[in-house]
Image (cartoon, rainbow, N blue to C red):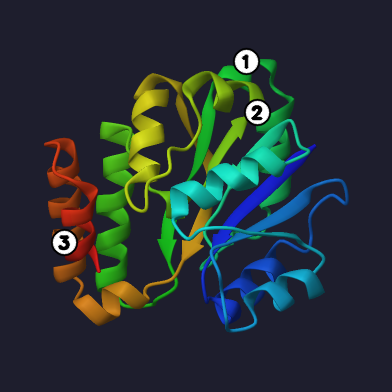
Amino acid sequence: MLSIIIPTLNCRDELVRTLDAFALRPPEWEIIVSDGGSSDGTLEAAELAGARTLVGPAGRGRQLAAGADAAAGVWFLFWHADTQPQPGWVPIMERFLRNPENRFRAGYCRLVLNDAAPQARRVERLANWRTETLGLPYGDQGLLISDEYYEHVGGFKPLPLMEDVDIVRRIGRRRLTTLDTAAITSAVRYRRDGWWGRPIKNITCLSMYLLGMPISVIRKLYG
């Protein structure tokens, strides 16, 4: 059984699209929406789509950890609310789950942005190079991991930012696998901050984190 865990905060419209994309899943695969106090109908939309809902303090790391604690599955797929799985994702996930060697590995998807601009393809190439070369997939690429291995590496820490980098560094590049499917994620931040501006901001935030800067300082820059 797989538990799909999605942290949310005032993202109703994005979540509706994502839950629609997850509708074609095996019936035993549950969806848990771990909310940080939405006031825009996010929880109502989740419940209407048949997802289990939790409400707790805001903070993506804290919300992901709460979702894992409540999950019934022996596998977890951590996923962002503004990201949809590529059509055909189910058999690819199933193959990963059925391979006993993957009990102590974790999988992630290739990044695709939902924008036709040529600049989006450049961002995708850079992001996918980062994940393949440095072993640093971000949360918008999903994270597929067994409950056993999740507990082994210590789970998500209660971080408001960089919780994705924190856990994949503990997993390690050699135990990360690229799944043969894509996570189609929102390009809103890139359109807002610029096709060069947003990647530069992301790299700066990552560098600050790796250098040990406080998360509170990084969060102000991240926006």
Q: Position of residue 129 (x, y in %)?
A: 28, 43
Element class at badge 3: helix
Q: Residues within 10 Å of mark 3 (few under 14, many from 20)?
A: some
**Residue at position x 25%, y 69% in the image:** 223
Label 2 is placed on what type of residue?
Answer: Asp
Of the numbered discs 2 and 3, the one sitting upstream in the chain is: 2
Q: Which label is found at residue 147?
A: 2
Which of label 1 and label 2 is nearer to you? 2
Which of label 3 and label 1 is nearer to you? 3
Q: Which label is found at residue 201?
A: 3
**Residue at position x 28%, y 73% in the image:** 190
Mark 1 lies on residue: 101
Q: Which label is found at residue 35?
A: none
Q: Position of residue 33 (x, y in %)?
A: 66, 59
Q: CA distance from mark 2 to mark 3?
A: 33 Å
Q: CA distance from mark 3 to mark 1?
A: 37 Å
